[in-house]
Image (tube, rainbow, N blue to C red):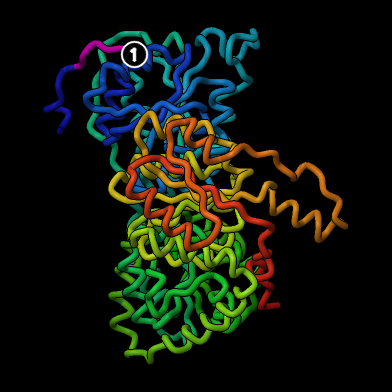
Amino acid sequence: MTSNDAPPPAAMTTAEAVVSQIVRNGINTIYALPGVQNDYLFDALAGATDKLRLIHTRHEQGAAYMALGAALATGKPQVFTVVPGPGILNATAAICTAYALNAPVLALTGQIASNAIGRGLGLLHEIPDQLGLLRSLTKSAERINAPHEGPAKVNRAFTEMRSGRPRPVALEAPLDVWPRRAPVQLLPAAEALEAPLDIDAVKAAAKLLAAAERPLMIVGGGALDASAAVRSVAEILQAPVSSHRTGRGVLDSRHPLSVNSAVGHRFWRDADVVLAVGTRLQLQQLQWGLDDKIKIVRIDADADELNRVRPASVGIVGDARRVLEALADELAKLSAKRPSRAEDVQRMRAVSDADWAQCKPQIAFLEAIRAELPEDGIFVDELTQLGYVSRLAFPIYRPRSFITPGYQGTLGWGLATALGAKAARPDVPVVAVSGDGGFMFNVQELATAVQHHIPIVVVLMNDGAFGNVLRTQTEDFGNRRIATNLNNPDFVKLAESFGALGLRATTPEELRLALRQAFNSGQPTIIDVPVGPLPSPWNVLRFTRSRP
């Protein structure tokens, strides 16, 4: 629609303008918790129920994590709304996790009355410089001061989320601004800004990679939408493709060149050229180590990443899929057919698999989940022993089917994040693994799952403790234990009290049967898995430096 075709401005409140413009940007679900500063916003939402589904949660953290889970499962912008002050502060764990995961999430919040902002009057939900706080946690944050500002500021927020490196953004509106009415011109949906393709840099990268004897690819979350292009380049180069957390599933785990980060570490030792796509490369550069012999080609949407630790030999800013497709074309001109490295990969995989013998209990439970979860089913990694091991030992077949908290390691995110993933992808099963400690952080969202008919499955590894910390206290601090033992409810009865399905499994075989029952039930389900202390995975997960 051109400006000449646009309908004339219509009188509407700020809240109605914001809601209408959010709908124009393709949003059909908002995760929310109401409150007085947002009363007029929720009235506008009530008037848009023919276009929007509103899922209300039992805690602000739950609303924000649900939006995050939906964003991670789809790769598309999502919106949550909560009250200002303590409401938005409760959501900040999810916001900082979204920032770490490069997730397009819009935090929409209220504010105290506009004439009182910054005066320190002690009004309800007032905190010092809320906008400044949001700007420190997001890619951008703005305040809406009048009805006519709503559409443009909403669109700027969506442009930020869709352009370059996706990250969370925020908008706030004072409680006296939401109900103001004035003529408002709604806008077409925001468009993403795309970096121009630097073909000279692509050619330089192709030349360097074509000359490599032992190339290696490292992929992160920035490559999730470039799966086919990653595969094409990997097969031309016969380069093993390694992913750590957020890049899992970019290349199917069954592909002959796909390796986990433990195997990737072994290939890193001798690699002469590394192609890093959409990854911070933090683990590799800071823990595995660098020397003068290794050359690194980096493709990233964020120019700052190219030289953050050490300048890239060749750095290319742009969309991973577009750049890799161009790179594949250039490599096809330069590279003769290379001998297969599938045998080398298989040998390295076998060596790494032997290291995992110490974690057989965790692997057996993960194998049970993998056997019952369809190929396109979503697995949500939580801060628990099963989650830690899953990052290397759980096969992933498709992009966006392994959801992880990344470097933030936000304990307790799993239940609510899984709810968001399932709400956004009702067509696939969603399984979250959790420990008994982390599960209780957001246990109240079982009520949300039941009320809104969101049938996720939580596999709850129940050892009666913050098990990872307890092991550290036992092994590294002379068995001086403090603040780690837990007094738990009966989780089966707890699930049933919410109206969910509660099951118990004590072996991997029983877990398979319970998962089958849970998927067939169509109900939110908690599977309690009582376990004792599990063997430590950290000897395998703590990679040593391989270069001086």
Vertical side of 269 occupied by 200: above or below:
above
Q: Position of residue 143 (x, y in %)?
A: 46, 22
Vertical side of 181 occupied by 493: above or below:
below
457 horizontally vs 328: left or right: right
What's the residue at 64%, 77% (across, down)?
A: 291
Magenta region includes residue 99 = no
Residue 387 visible in the shown view: yes
The magenta segment: 9-13
Magenta region includes residue 10 = yes
Q: Amino acid at mark 1?
A: Asp
What's the residue at 66%, 61% (across, down)?
A: 534
Q: Position of residue 538 (x, y in %)?
A: 67, 65
Main secondary-structure element of the magenta-colored stretch: strand
Q: Which residue is mark 1?
A: 43
Instruction: Pick the residue in front: 340 or 180.
Output: 340
Quadrant of the snapshot with the C terminus:
bottom right
